Every structure is written in structure tokens, then in C-alpha cells.
Image (cartoon, rainbow, N blue to C red):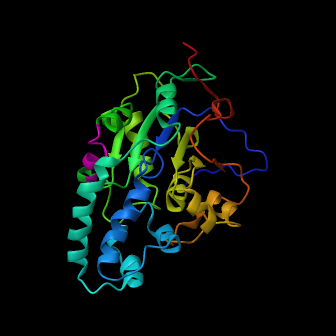
Amino acid sequence: MADHDQGLTPNFPPIRACLFDMDGLLINTEDLYTHCSNIVLNKYGRPNLPWSVKAQLMGIPGSSNSETFHKWAKLPISREQYKQEQGEQHKIHFPECKPLPGVEVLLRNLKSAKTTQGLPVKSALASSSDKTNYGLKTSRPATKAVLEILPEEHRVLGDDPRIQQGRGKPAPDIYLLALQSINSSLPEGTPKIEPKECLVFEDSVLGVEAGRRAGMRAVWVPHPNLVAEYKGKEKDVLAGRTELYPIGNEEQLGTVDDGWAEQLVSLENFPYEKYGIVISQS
């Protein structure tokens, strides 16, 4: 069960681990996913993918070929053919991926950062992308260089065999595994990092929920079109309580205005001090 220590004014410890989603947060893949989907949809006379549907797909492994998508799309082709044609578009367009504003500076700052208590701040990746798509998305040298700021042993992908089938986001497993990968590499004598000492960075609604279910704090950095979809529901998103994809275990969720999550416009000018993080001035 997640330890949410719910109070009106939570007294949080400094953040010792920053755990990052990738698509739409670190790199501009969400727009590319939409573009690839639209090419295939338009080929068969279907309209562009609306954000009302896309919002339900973000963050879930394999969701672009899911029941939710096909129930809306009503394509005259099989799911297998759609997957094949979409995959062809991914091979063409994913190598165009670029880091989003503020990402490189944030990752580099965190690499040498310490907490206000003098402990090093660790970082990890927790992405629903599988290994093949990760390779395509990071094939551009400049993009690869930015993602490689995150240590390889701390990059957890959606097809990691340690993640049980069907336990992708919004389940907390991928974030707990990312934390485990960090804790297993800490020097002997260093206290293990607890979930409440972790900060999850997400652009998707279900990703925020996954972080909250893991008992971690969260930062939501949504695409402007997703912001429009969730206007008036932001507090529910930050609490992990949108009920977009119910999986039970509601005791893992937060409560509205509990202070465990916040929304940011971008990763530029990140408020390190707020999270007990001290960056090197050198």
C-alpha cells in the first residue's frame, strides 16, 4: 500500500530520486504518434485522431492499437494490418524525435545535484515504450546524447520482463522497479531511497496516477491540448483520481489538494529548492 501521509500541510523529505517518463515529457513523441496515426487513418477515409480519444491512450503500453482506439477509429482493416502500417510510419518519423524545452538542462543539473542533506540525487527512466521504439526514438545523435544522461542500468522500458503482463501504467510497477534499480546500485551504508523521497515526472494522466499509486510525489507537465481536455479536472489528475482506467486498489491513490503533486507548463526553470534539491553552481 502506498504511504501517502495525508495531512493538510505535508512535511516532505528532500527528493533523492527523480523518475522520468519519456514520450511527451522528455521528447516530442506525442505529436509524432498523432501524426503517424493520422496518416493511416486518413488513408482509409477516417478523421484525425482527436485529443478526447488520444488522452485515453497516453502512457499505456500498446494503447495505440487498443480496443479504445479501434472502437473509435472503425477502420476497414484488421488490427494486425493497422499495427503493421502504423509501425512503418513510426520507422519513418520516430527518428525525428527531439528533446523538449528544458530537458537537457534539467537532466544535466540533476546529475551533479545533492539534497539539502548532502545526499546525491539519482535519476531513472520509466517509459512505456518498448526497446525497439526506444531505439527508433533515440536514433538521432543529439536526442540519444540527452537520454544517455540517464544511466543505462536505470532505464526501465515497457517490455522489461520484470514487469508483469498487464501491469503497465496506471499500475505503479514500472516506477517501483525504477526505484529498485536505483536502490540496488547505492553504495553500501547509504540508506535506501523511499517512495516518498521520489519525484515522478509525467505528461500523461495515467502516468501521474502510476506515480501516486507508487507512493511518490509527482510533477505533471501536460501537452497544451491535454490541458484543454482536462480543464476543471486538474486536481483529480494530480490526485490520480480521474478513474480513466480503473484497476482497483484505490487506497493507493491520493486525495485532492494533498500537496503530493503539482502541474508545470514545461521543464524549463525547474523549482529545485521546492523539492530540497541543490544544484551545482560550477
Magenta residues? 133-140
Q: Main secondary structure of the magenta part?
A: helix
* Residue pictured at 30% horizontal, 55% vertical: 93
Q: Does residue 11 sit above or below 279 in this rendering? A: below
How many dots with numbers? 0
Residue at image location 50% in from the left, 28% down from the top: 110
Q: Residue at x 24, y 63 (%)?
A: 87
Residue 74 vertical position relative to residue 141 in the rendered view, above or below = below
Answer with the quarter of the image where residue 237 lies.
bottom right
- Judging depth in this view, the residue of 71 and 121 nearest the camera is 71
Q: Position of residue 50 (x, y in %)?
A: 49, 73
Q: Quadrant of residue 279?
A: top right
x, y percentage for residue 5? 67, 49
Tell me if I can see residue 167 in this picture: no
* Horizontal and vertical percent position of residue 83: 24, 70
Task: Choose between 139 and 204: the one closer to the eye.
Answer: 139
